[in-house]
Image (tube, grey):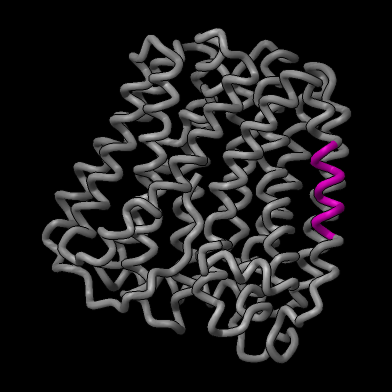
């Protein structure tokens, strides 16, 4: 067994915390894929899928700066268990989505799940160092960083398969059961999830912390460039709105939609691992960021004109291979550039901007998806990302090389 993975076999508490996190990310896609197929069938309109995606990402973006601070002020175990139970209750609402008239309930349910996820993610990440020994922390971060891509592959593909074979409501039942299991796993973690207990002492008010982070970013051109990198791929994420339509156009149905989301996750999972060598060459980092943005846009421009579904899958993989690379390259440079006392807040701001860009793109795509051909959405999103990449590179190429960094590569969760 690779040395990195032995922390799972040796540390029961980490295994339980990681298992609970896998459940949360898997639930996202085991619900989302069948829902993106179900809503157009019930309503006859594709924009409902875009609204669901935008609600998920938009609520997450708006809450992250606040929930990240609360993870240091409130008992993390309680946050994690409460978030899972709230998601469980939200999934139950999806069983009422049976017609066009009840379709808005899907937005309510996904919105509630997004709120729960916004509380869960920072609390889980902050708890991780407390359940492993210091020597195991790098390996634990690497494993935890793979959770999103892994469960996008498994959750999306299995969600498509199960929905195609047994219907969406079976997927909702499985998700509800898994979320309860995730709460149990978290409750069984024996090590404390907070060093010294929870409390507000020494932690700034969320708004004050956010203002300090914005002030730091605004005063530094390099940091401004780095926190705007993920927005390129985010502004192209409206393509997710037409995944079910792409699958239907190629005769692949719910299974095809699941495969599209699965290869998206596979690209985001493998991109960072295969591009780690770039992280050791400072001169490659800024060009690599520009190239990754441009490659994402080019991938979806290719999808718009591809006549074969296997080629579509390959191009989606390439696009999100680039997107995952973009995510970890920008995280790595920020990790080196930002001082420790501000790092958490700068990363929260970085993630907030990225997810807001995703929400804007998905809302824009959902507004036009019923009025234009799906290829127009694909071309528009691809061009936006490609033009953004060119403009960003023209502005950023005047910046010097990144500062010296250590050999340790921080674990990071790939972007949607």
> Which of the two residues, 205 or 42, is positioned nearer the viewer here?
42
In percent of width and height, residue 158 lies at 68, 32
**Residue 332 at least partly seen:** yes
In the figure, is residue 43 to the left or right of 324? right
Q: Residue sitting at 55 percent across and 32 percent down? A: 261
**Residue 68 at least partly seen:** no
Q: Which image quadrant for residue 33?
A: top right
Tell me the magenta residue range.
Answer: 174-183
| Depicted 263 relative to depicted 207: above or below | above
| Depicted 190 relative to depicted 414: above or below | below
In percent of width and height, residue 290 lies at 23, 48
Q: Which image quadrant for residue 248?
A: top right
Q: Residue 176 lies in magenta, yes or no?
A: yes
Q: Residue sitting at 56 percent across and 85 percent down? A: 134
| Depicted 202 relative to depicted 290: above or below | below
Q: Main secondary structure of the magenta part?
A: helix
In percent of width and height, residue 282 lies at 20, 66
In the figure, is residue 363 to the left or right of 45? left
Q: Residue 368 lies in magenta, yes or no?
A: no
Residue projecting furthest to the front: 1
In percent of width and height, residue 208 lies at 54, 77
| Depicted 288 relative to depicted 248: above or below | below
Q: Residue sitting at 33 percent across and 14 percent down? A: 305
């Amino acid at each position: 067994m690779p040395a990195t993975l032995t922390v799972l076999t040796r540390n029961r508490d980490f295994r339980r915390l990681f298992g609970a996190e896998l459940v949360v990310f898997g639930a996202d896609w085991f619900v989302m894929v069948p829902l993106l197929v179900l809503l157009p069938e019930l309503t006859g309109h594709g924009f409902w899928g875009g609204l669901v995606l935008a609600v998920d990402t938009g609520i997450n973006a708006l809450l992250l700066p606040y929930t990240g601070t609360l993870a240091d002020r409130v008992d993390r175990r309680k946050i994690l268990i409460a978030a899972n139970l709230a998601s469980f209750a939200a999934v139950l609402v999806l069983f009422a989505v049976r017609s066009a008239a009840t379709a808005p309930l899907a937005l309510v349910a996904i919105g509630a799940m997004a709120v729960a996820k916004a509380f869960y993610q920072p609390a889980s990440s902050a708890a991780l160092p407390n359940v492993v020994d210091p020597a195991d922390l790098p390996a634990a971060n690497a494993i935890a960083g793979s959770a999103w891509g892994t469960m996008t592959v498994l959750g999306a593909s299995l969600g498509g398969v199960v929905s195609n074979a047994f219907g969406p409501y079976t997927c909702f039942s499985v998700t509800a059961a898994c979320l309860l299991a995730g709460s149990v796993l978290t409750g069984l973690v024996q090590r404390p999830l907070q060093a010294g207990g929870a409390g507000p002492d020494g932690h700034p008010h969320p708004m004050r912390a956010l203002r300090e982070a914005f002030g730091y970013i605004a005063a530094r051109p390099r940091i401004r460039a780095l926190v705007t990198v993920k927005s390129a791929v985010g502004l192209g994420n409206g393509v997710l709105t037409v995944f079910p339509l792409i699958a239907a156009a190629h005769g692949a149905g719910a299974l095809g939609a699941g495969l599209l989301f699965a290869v998206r996750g596979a690209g985001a999972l493998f991109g960072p691992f295969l591009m780690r060598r770039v992280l050791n060459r400072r001169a490659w980092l800024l060009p690599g960021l520009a190239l990754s943005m441009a490659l994402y846009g080019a991938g979806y421009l290719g999808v718009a004109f591809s006549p074969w579904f296997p080629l579509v899958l390959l191009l989606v993989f390439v696009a999100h291979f680039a997107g995952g690379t973009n995510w970890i390259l920008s995280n790595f440079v920020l990790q080196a550039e930002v001082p420790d006392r501000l790092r958490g807040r700068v990363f929260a701001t970085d993630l907030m901007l990225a997810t807001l860009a995703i929400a804007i793109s998905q809302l824009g795509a959902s507004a036009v998806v019923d009025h234009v051909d799906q290829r127009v959405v694909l071309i528009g999103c691809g061009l936006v990302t490609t033009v953004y990449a060119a403009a960003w590179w023209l502005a950023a190429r005047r910046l010097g090389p990144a500062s010296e960094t250590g050999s340790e590569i921080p674990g990071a969760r790939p972007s949607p």
